[in-house]
Amino acid sequence: MNIDPAMVRNPPTYRPRGFTLMELLIVIAIIAILAGMIVALVGVTGDKKALSTTRAEIERISTAIEGYKLKIGVYPPSPSPVTFPNTDPTNTSLFYELTSAELFLPAQYTNRQFQVGITQSELYAACGVGRIFNSTKLDPGGDIEDRKVRAYSFIQTATPRQTNTIEFRGQNIIVFVAPAEGPNGRKVNPLYYLAGADAIHNPGSFDLWAVIKTKQGATVVGNWKD
């Protein structure tokens, strides 16, 4: 067998074949499809978490409202006027009713647990109600003047994520919110509330719900069966 000396001195070099433009485009397309599937899956997971969080918060507030009914004898009042949807059922006195208040004469409600206060005129301007039923009257010296209605704390804790201060009719009031993150980050999702004869889904009881923004659009989560 004869071997060419030139082949021994300079063996041929074998180089792998590169990708063609078409092959590169196909790979890029596959990666884009997989990335889109992952993003969609993350979005669905985020929506489920937001809705689950909202349901848990509505259940927590609903339990407090039922406790209020057992102690006070009535449900916390709806915002007035109550010709829904002409009124805004997010602007309620729920926070003040469920966390209790002390009425320092002449007309200043103070919540010692959360260090917030609201006057009767502010309450009426924002919510259309003239008083906080779950309150204890105190005279300026701090002695209890009227024990006929004693304030109860139905909500022991409320984090900043569960409440929000909003301005309505020129007044700042605190409302409960559903601490759920939508597709664009954290949003303020105020809880809607209607009670008694004003309740639509639970007549005679109360409706409590929130509207959560998801990838599919606005989703209503309420304390009633669909």
Image (cartoon, rainbow, N blue to C red):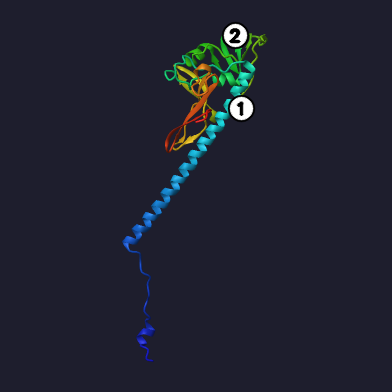
Return the disc, 1 or 2, that comes first in the chain's sequence.
2
Q: Measured along the vertical axis of the image, is residue 195 above or below residue 58?
A: above
Question: Is label 1 in a helix, a strand or a loop?
Answer: loop
Q: Do labels 1 and 2 touch, CB within 8 Å?
A: no
Q: Residue furthest left?
A: 21
Using residue 28 as the reference point, say whether residue 128 is left or right of it. Answer: right
Q: Nearer the viewer, residue 137 or 68?
A: 68
Residue matched to label 2: 105
Q: On the image, which quarter does residue 114 sit in?
A: top right
**Can residue 112 be seen in this snapshot?**
no
Question: Is label 2 in a helix, a strand or a loop?
Answer: loop
Residue at image x 54%, y 19%?
204
Q: How many residues crowd mark 1 within 10 Å: few (<14), some (14–19), many (20+)?
A: few
Residue at image x 36%, y 54%?
29
Residue at image x 46%, y 46%?
41
Q: On the image, which quarter does residue 115 sit in?
A: top right
Using residue 8 as the reference point, say whether residue 50 is left or right of it. Answer: right
Image position, residue 96 (x, y; %) = 57, 19
Residue matched to label 1: 157
Query: Which quarter shows the N terminus?
Result: bottom left
Disc 1 from disc 2: Cα separation:
26 Å
Amino acid under disc 2: Leu
Image position, residue 53 (x, y; %) = 54, 34
Q: Measured along the vertical axis of the image, is residue 4 above or below residue 51?
A: below
Q: Nearer the viewer, residue 122 or 62?
A: 62
